[in-house]
Amino acid sequence: MTIRNIITIPDPVLREVCAPIESVDDAVRKLADDMLDTMYDAPGIGLAASQIGILQRIFVLDVAAEGEDKSPMVFINPEIVWSSEDLSIYQEGCLSIPEFYEEVERPASVRVKYQNRDGESQELEADGLLATCIQHELDHLNGKLFIDYLSKLKRDRVVKKFSKAARMTAKA
């Protein structure tokens, strides 16, 4: 298993829409394993393939609380088929926007259809942190970031800060 580099803003690959995975094979399972290793190493609770430069519709999650056993989840070709009218607010962060956190309002519950790591069709109803993470990672697969839910002023400040840091790194 391999720990991959996580792409950060302003890299344009984060704004790309990911393509469906045609068939779940050993290469896709290896990608899922690498993504989980990368997520745990970061550390984070979710990672989409686009965050490591792979434009395929797959993300991984583990929302187990600290001290609990790991509970890795793999979502291939996910699609939200229902979301609640009730909303919830969570303070979100992102491995592609390190050390920046902001409250985001999203549907409190969702139902997601997806394939698991064996290619089997699954459906899961989620609420709380799991629902928020599913929506956050699925946004990545659609080229959307959690900062897109913020005011233009806040979003522009964050992008400017990371763009400046990227220029400074490039000069070094």
Image: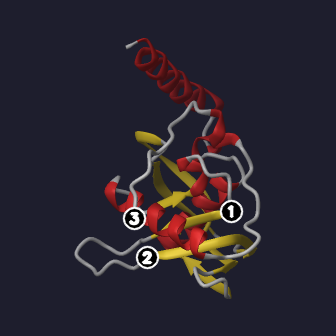
In 3D space, how far apart are the residues under numbered discs 1 and 2 (Cα atoms)? Answer: 17 Å
Task: Report x, y in % for residue 62.
Answer: 43, 71
- How many residues crowd mark 1 within 10 Å: few (<14), some (14–19), many (20+)? many
Relative to 36, residue 161 above or below: above
Relative to 167, residue 27 above or below: below
Instruction: Specify the quadrant that holds the C terminus.
Output: top left
Identify residue for label 2.
72
Between 104 and 144, the residue placed more toward the observer is 144
Residue at x 53% of width, y 25% of height: 157
Give the residue type at disc 3: Met
Identify residue for label 1.
57
Task: Report x, y in % for residue 58.
Answer: 62, 65
Q: Secondary structure at mark 1?
A: loop
In 3D space, how far apart are the residues under numbered discs 3 and 2 (Cα atoms)? Answer: 15 Å
- The reply to whether dot 1 and dot 3 touch (C-beta < 8 Å) is no
Give the residue type at disc 1: Arg
Foreground: disc 3 or disc 2: 3
- How many residues crowd mark 3 within 10 Å: few (<14), some (14–19), many (20+)? few
Residue with the most extreme top position: 171
- The reply to whether dot 3 and dot 2 touch (C-beta < 8 Å) is no
Give the numbered dot on residue 1.
3
Foreground: disc 1 or disc 3: 3
Among the two numbered marks 1 and 2 on one chain, the one whose residue lies closer to the N terminus: 1
Give the residue type at disc 2: Pro
Give the numbered dot on residue 49.
none
Q: Secondary structure at mark 2?
A: loop
